[in-house]
Image (spheres, rainbow, N blue to C red):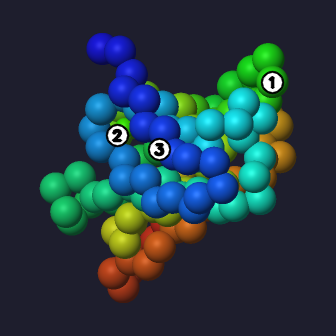
């Protein structure tokens, strides 16, 4: 399945909503993806009650590195110029599949019901 492009505009802050499709999210159209404006990608709960279980990988690019995030529920997504990731309000897992995760992306794990926790490995 090919990826769907979701493109933001330069100099605007966006909140993108992830779907189960494979997507490429562009926070802005500048090829260097740096505008000083925070663009957000928000993940939603599969079925409304479960958290997501995401694996993040840094992909080296010719102009700038970017994050690739995958899971069975959310598909294979590329994040370009996305400065902030919001996980769900349920128990999420966020796996970092890279040695060099010195990445200027903020991960907001959200809140979760008592007795559950967000895991990062
Ligand atoms: Ca997706």
- Residue at 65% x, 61% y: name it: 38
Q: Is residue 75 above or below residue 83?
A: above
Looking at this rendering, what residue extends furthest in the bottom direction? 114
Residue 40: x and y, percent? Answer: 54, 58
Q: Earlier in the sequence, mark 3 or mark 1?
A: 3
Residue 30 visible in the current orientation: yes
Residue nearer the viewer, 82 or 57: 82
Residue 63's tag is 1
- Residue at 39% x, 22% y: name it: 3
Say which element carries label 3. strand
Q: Cβ–Cβ below 8 Å for labels 2 and 1?
A: no
| Left or right of residue 46: residue 107 | right
The reply to whether the residue tagged 2 has its Cβ within 8 angstroms of ligand 1 is yes
**In what quadrant does ligand 1 lie?**
top left
Residue 69: x and y, percent? Answer: 52, 37
Q: Earlier in the sequence, mark 2 or mark 1?
A: 1
Q: Is residue 59 above or below residue 35?
A: above
């Amino acid at each position: 399945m090919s990826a769907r492009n979701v493109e933001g505009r330069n100099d605007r802050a966006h909140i993108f909503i992830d779907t189960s499709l494979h997507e490429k999210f562009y926070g802005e159209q500048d090829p260097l993806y740096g505008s000083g404006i925070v663009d957000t990608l928000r993940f939603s709960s599969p079925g409304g009650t479960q958290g997501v279980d995401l694996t993040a990988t840094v992909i080296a690019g010719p102009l700038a590195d970017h994050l690739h995030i995958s899971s069975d529920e959310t598909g294979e997504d590329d994040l370009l110029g996305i400065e902030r990731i919001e996980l769900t309000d349920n128990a999420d897992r966020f796996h970092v599949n890279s040695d060099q995760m010195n990445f200027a992306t903020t991960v907001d794990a959200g809140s979760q019901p008592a007795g559950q926790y967000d895991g990062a490995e």
